[in-house]
């Protein structure tokens, strides 16, 4: 990674090993130090040093994304209350954070020094934010939402895995690329693509194209759906949450879009429902990946090359899902008695839950700013029309199936 700082001469430190105030001269014994190679700094605690180095390499990207998120939230609130005169702003900071990031990325251009920090936001910080969302729901609520949305999840995945590869092959794409787009659209975006790719022995170029398609059309859905969903479902927030959880691709995109809707309509149940439904989609990788491997490699069972069984299980069941369920268990236990865990007063416990809710929302906004900062329009030119056509078709098909099944579910009284 290249640095944005100019190279600095080391001559200013030449007197560190001499007597204070006296320069090293050729006549002093210390002159040998000047001629000898520079010694590495003494590190008393190597793990701490490595941790500090890791933080330093990533802080710039995180700080930029956090700054954009803070400005976006403030601007959305200021426009809604001070300019438009609402008591509560009808605007969300999430799309503004994405927009600001995309402008910086495509108009100004970002130095490479920010890349590590942005990757930190889109991976570790995203997972932490989703885990913290578990504090919003007890296990009973998670189970009820999951059962309610499960038929829609299954229907969307089945239709996508059957129809999208068929369209892709007839559009001129390879069977593997079409399958990757189908899996990424129907299950969990980039994570599903990266998990399925080695199982079907996809080429690097196919993986890159599939990821770009999912990111592009998932981004569009994330920005558009918060304003379209009220026209589709009105105040039926349970159906709206299921739609967000099934019709948008990546986990970050689902939670970001649902958070935007929550901020627009003061409907926290939408984010709750969307998160649980999306987690159910993610868990479907346990079934879908071995199935895809069996279809492409009938002679052998699925075993990812150079990966242990533990790594494979971790890929199939991401740790943030386990973390989300763990936080939900904590919430369930804390709510079970008047004093949470027999220690915390009810008001203190509620304040803690409110703080976790605020933290998850702010982290998600920072993640969305990082997504915008990492979205370059140049990738559209590299894709070509055929993958874009299939990616658009996949997004519309999954969204249409989700809407149809939710309507059918309502008509049947479920």
Image (cartoon, rainbow, N blue to C red):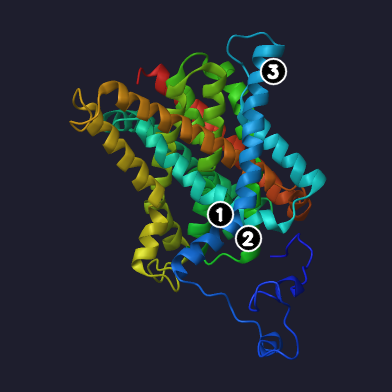
Alpha carbons under labels 1 and 3: distance apart: 41 Å
Alpha carbons under labels 2 and 3: distance apart: 43 Å
Does residue 21 show up? Answer: yes
Q: Is 336 rendered above or below residue 157? A: above
Q: Which residue was labeled with disc 1?
A: 180
Badge 1 crowding class, 10 Å Cα cut-off, few under 14, some 14 to 19, many 20 or more, is: many
Which residue occupies the foreground of this view, 187 or 292?
187
Q: Earlier in the sequence, mark 2 or mark 1?
A: 1
Q: Earlier in the sequence, mark 1 or mark 3?
A: 3
Q: Which residue was labeled with disc 3?
A: 79
SS of the residue at dot 3? helix
Across and down, in percent, residue 325 comes to: 32, 41
The residue mark sitting in front, 2 or 3, is 3
Across and down, in percent, residue 330 comes to: 27, 37
Pointer 2 with pointer 1, Cβ within 8 A? yes
Q: Which residue was labeled with disc 2?
A: 206
Across and down, in percent, residue 308 comes to: 37, 70
Q: Is 110 rendered above or below residue 32? A: above
Q: Quadrant of residue 222?
A: top right
Please tell me which residue is depicted at 36% across the width and 25% down the height of the picture. 351
Q: How many marks?
A: 3
Left or right position of 2 against 254: right
Q: Quadrant of residue 278?
A: top left
Alpha carbons under labels 2 and 1: distance apart: 8 Å
Across and down, in percent, residue 36 comes to: 67, 89
Left or right position of 374 against 127: right
SS of the residue at dot 1? helix
């Amino acid at each position: 990674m290249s640095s944005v700082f100019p190279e600095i001469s080391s001559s200013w430190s030449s007197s560190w090993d001499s007597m204070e105030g006296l320069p090293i001269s050729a006549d002093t014994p210390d002159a040998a130090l000047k001629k000898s190679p520079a010694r590495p700094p003494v590190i008393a605690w190597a793990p701490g040093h490595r941790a500090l180095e890791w933080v330093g390499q990533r802080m710039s990207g995180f700080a930029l994304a956090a700054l954009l998120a803070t400005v976006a939230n403030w601007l959305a609130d200021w426009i809604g209350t001070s300019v438009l005169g609402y008591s509560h702003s009808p605007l969300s900071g999430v799309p503004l954070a994405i927009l600001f990031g995309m402008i910086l990325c495509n108009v100004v251009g970002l130095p490479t020094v920010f890349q590590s920090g942005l990757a930190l936001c889109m991976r570790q910080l995203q997972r932490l934010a989703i885990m913290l969302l578990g504090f919003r729901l007890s296990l009973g609520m998670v189970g009820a939402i999951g059962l309610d949305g499960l038929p829609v999840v299954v229907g969307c995945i089945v239709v996508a895995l059957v129809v999208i590869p068929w369209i892709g092959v007839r559009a001129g794409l390879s069977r593997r690329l079409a399958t990757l787009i189908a899996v990424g659209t129907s299950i969990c975006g980039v994570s599903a693509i990266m998990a399925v790719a080695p199982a079907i022995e996809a080429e690097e170029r196919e993986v890159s194209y599939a990821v770009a398609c999912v990111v592009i059309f998932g981004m569009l859905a994330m920005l558009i759906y918060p304003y379209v969903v009220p026209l589709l479902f009105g105040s039926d927030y349970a159906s709206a949450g299921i739609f967000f959880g099934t019709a948008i691709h990546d986990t970050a995109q689902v939670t970001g879009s649902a958070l935007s809707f929550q901020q627009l309509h003061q409907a926290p149940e939408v984010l709750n429902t969307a998160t649980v439904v999306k987690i159910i989609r993610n868990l479907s990788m346990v079934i879908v990946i071995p199935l895809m491997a069996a279809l492409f490699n009938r002679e052998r069972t699925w075993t990812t090359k150079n990966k242990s069984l533990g790594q494979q299980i971790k890929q199939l069941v991401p740790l943030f899902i386990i973390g989300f369920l763990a936080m939900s268990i904590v919430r369930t236990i804390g709510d079970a008695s008047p004093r949470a865990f027999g220690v915390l007063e009810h008001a203190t416990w509620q304040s803690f839950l409110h703080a976790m809710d605020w933290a998850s929302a702010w982290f998600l906004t920072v993640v969305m700013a990082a997504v915008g900062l990492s979205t370059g329009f140049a990738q559209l030119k590299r894709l070509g029309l055929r993958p874009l056509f299939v990616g658009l078709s996949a997004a519309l098909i999954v969204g249409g199936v989700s809407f149809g099944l939710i309507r059918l579910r309502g008509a049947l009284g479920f």
